[in-house]
Image: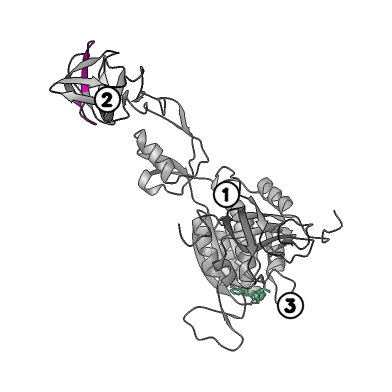
Amino acid sequence: MSLCDQPGLTPLEQALAHLAERVSVVAGVEKLTLLHADGRVLSEDIVSPVDVPPTDNSAMDGFALHGEGSSWNVVGEALAGHPYMGPPLQPGQCIRIMTGASLPKGADRVVMQEYAELQDATLQVQQIPGSGDNIRRQAGDIRQGSKLLTAGTRLGPAELGLLASVGVTHVSVIRRPVAAVFSTGDELAEAGQQLGAGQIYDSNAIMVVTLLQRMGCEVLNLGRVADDEAALQQLLAEADLKADLVVTSGGVSVGEADYTRRVVEAMGELELWRLAIKPGKPFAFGRLQNSWFMGLPGNPVSALVTLHQLGAEVVRLLSGASPHERVRLPATAAEDIVKTPGRLDFQRGVYWLSADGVQAKALPRQNSQVLSAVAEANCYIVLEQERGSVIAGETIVVEPFDGSLRGMC
Ligand code: AMP
Ligand code: MG
């Protein structure tokens, strides 16, 4: 422990390592058409059943030539989907060919239309291309029998396009983990209701549900529960029966009405609590009878940051998806940033590319209930646990918001 560490707080890296050790992929696979497989995780490697491209073909609109020479006789044409069906080209012969059309036998190069001149059926070429020029070779992209994608790949538009390019119609994917979500707190009201004395609207439920969905979970929204030990226990037990992962928000701090930890400890085991991160210190993780438990702090920014930094890892492990590196970049602090040593900070900030490289600044309202600053931000400014305040001009680390956090593509 360094001088700056706060006693009893688990560093983020240690918490992530614990999750990796404990959580494993859910059981069950299903076979889906490509159209239904976006965002899903492959349960097996995929080997290409064909060569891509299936034949040598032209990379240009132009003429396919047989060898070198000075003039060629045009004996036919080939379009994409309409190969030349004549006999193999002989010396002095060529065909007109379009991009993507199969190369006829006997042709060994393609000249771009712009470098050739056609008079009647005779072609003159100013610059003779080298052997093999402007030809896309059979299997140049993918060879039949080669591994195309590995188990654990999360499928997106590019991977689905790749699968379609080899004629795959269905894929075997891992079942989506089921997450049950509810908020805790006597003060919470649902949007649309009149706020009573001391009430606030529940902002965590919608954030947690949508973020978990974007991470690939099937989500059961179980609503809200009051700060009441028996009611909490009942809802946790119900959630535990239905889900692989139970995610609550609120009630994991040290306040008088913070019952969640106690109830989880009675029902199962609390494995992590209190992390050396800001926001998000009261994050809790544990095991219920059948499912994993994640207790997010009640403050909305803390809930979002912990779900995004730690919950994402739990969901990835449950989903069977391969690890992926978070993108973190060096940037120059455009302004001073206030920080107290002791916890790893995820300040909400903006970064931009200037003539001098990437610059970033923290937004002014860093309190853990201020959601407006998250909506305004495009990155976290990740400040090391032992670091103190930052002076403008120092190098800092930014983590651009990924697709799961952004409101737009
Ligand atoms: P707790 O962790 O339950 O002590 O809550 C910490 C702070 O977050 C309190 O100010 C709560 O009112 C607030 N809070 C808890 N849950 C929510 C929620 N679902 N939506 C908005 N604020 C919440
Ligand atoms: Mg509470």
- Amino acid carrying label 2: it is Ser
Q: Where is residue 145 in the image (x, y as percent from the top left)?
A: 43, 25
Q: Do the residues labelled 2 and 1 touch (CB within 8 Å)?
A: no
Select label 2 or label 1 by which is in front.
2
The residue that disc 3 covers is 256
| Secondary structure mainly formed by the magenta segment | loop
Look at label 3 and name its amino acid.
Answer: Glu
Q: Please say if 32 is above or below 165.
A: below
Query: Residue shown at 25%/19% (left/top)?
Result: 104
The answer to which of marks 1 and 3 sits earlier in the sequence is 3
Query: Is residue 79 on the magenta stretch?
Result: yes
Residue found at x 41% / y 28%: 142
Query: Taking 33 as reference, is 400 left or right?
Result: right
Q: In this view, does 232 lie above or below 64?
A: below
Circle 1 packing at 10 Å, graded few (<14), some (14-19), many (20+), is many
Q: What element carries label 3?
A: loop
Residue at numbered disc 2: 102
| Mark 2: secondary structure | loop
Residue at the spot of label 1:
316
Tell me the magenta residue range: 78-95
Q: How far apart are marks 3 and 2 (CA)?
A: 75 Å
Q: Mark 2 and mark 1: span between their CA atoms?
A: 43 Å
